Amino acid sequence: VSEDQLAYRVATEYLDEARRTLDDLDKPPKPALQLCLAMVLLTEAVHGSMSMEFVKALQCGGNAHLRAGHPEEAKEAFDQMLQVAEAGYAYVEAAAALEKLVQINLGLGEANAAIECWQHALTIHSDNLKSRPEIIQSMEESLVALKQAAPMIAKAAEEARAARAAEAKKEAEEEGASRQRAAGSSDR
């Protein structure tokens, strides 16, 4: 066994252990997310950017960010996972990435993006995976329901954003008033 083969084997074992560890964390803390980024980058370096190992690392990273409450970072990981999986004709993984992106986009109130992802997943299931007719029918029915719900999803997301903005403004005003009172009392 050459040194390169040994290093590859050891790196692969460490990466597998890191992935399992991250998958076991319910709500990964910041150091775990930094480990996650390192794991993704190292997996790409060791196995290549078109490998199934890299796809698994991106999936692990996306899931870790979701559990940590970071949907935007998770979305980036699943977008990249989708691109790599499709480029490598790994349609099961591509469909899995799309289904996660639907979930994330709905959580962010981006109904149209969720619809696009669901349509893409439906195409993969019908054209590439040759899924059973009942799966295709269920996905088509879900797509119709998603399209019907899109205006309500968008409205709810807008109301939630407005409520968060109002809350942030209120907190800023209270903080400003508190500072003024503190400055006024220190002048005396």
Image (cartoon, helix red, strand yellow):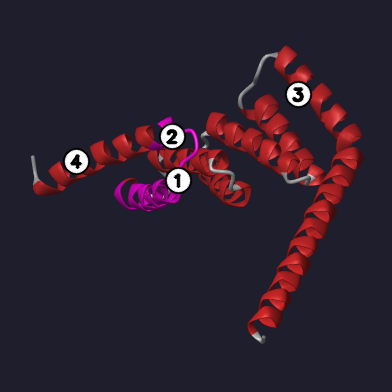
Q: How many neighbours does mark 4 have within 10 angstroms: few (below 14), some (14-19), or many (20 or more)?
A: few
Identify the disc placed on residue 10: 4
Q: Which mark is residue 139?
A: 3
State the SS at label 4.
Answer: helix
State the residue lying farthest toward the front: 188
Asked if labels 4 and 3 touch by Cβ distance under 8 angstroms, the answer is no
Closer to the camera, 81 or 63? 63
The magenta span reads 22-46
The structure residue drawn at horizontal position 46% and vertical position 38%, both measured from the top left corner, is 60
Amino acid type shown at disc 3:
Met
Q: Secondary structure at mark 2?
A: loop
Residue 186 screen position, x and y as percent: 63, 82
Q: Tell me the distance, in whole angstroms, between the alpha carbons under discs 1 and 3.
A: 35 Å
Q: Is residue 161 above or below residue 12?
A: below
**How many badges with numbers are in the image?**
4
Determine whether, in the image, residue 128 is placed left or right of residue 147.
Answer: left
Residue picked out by circle 1? 29
The mark lying in front, picked from 3 and 2, is 2
Residue lying at 79% horizontally and 39% vertically, measured from the top left: 115
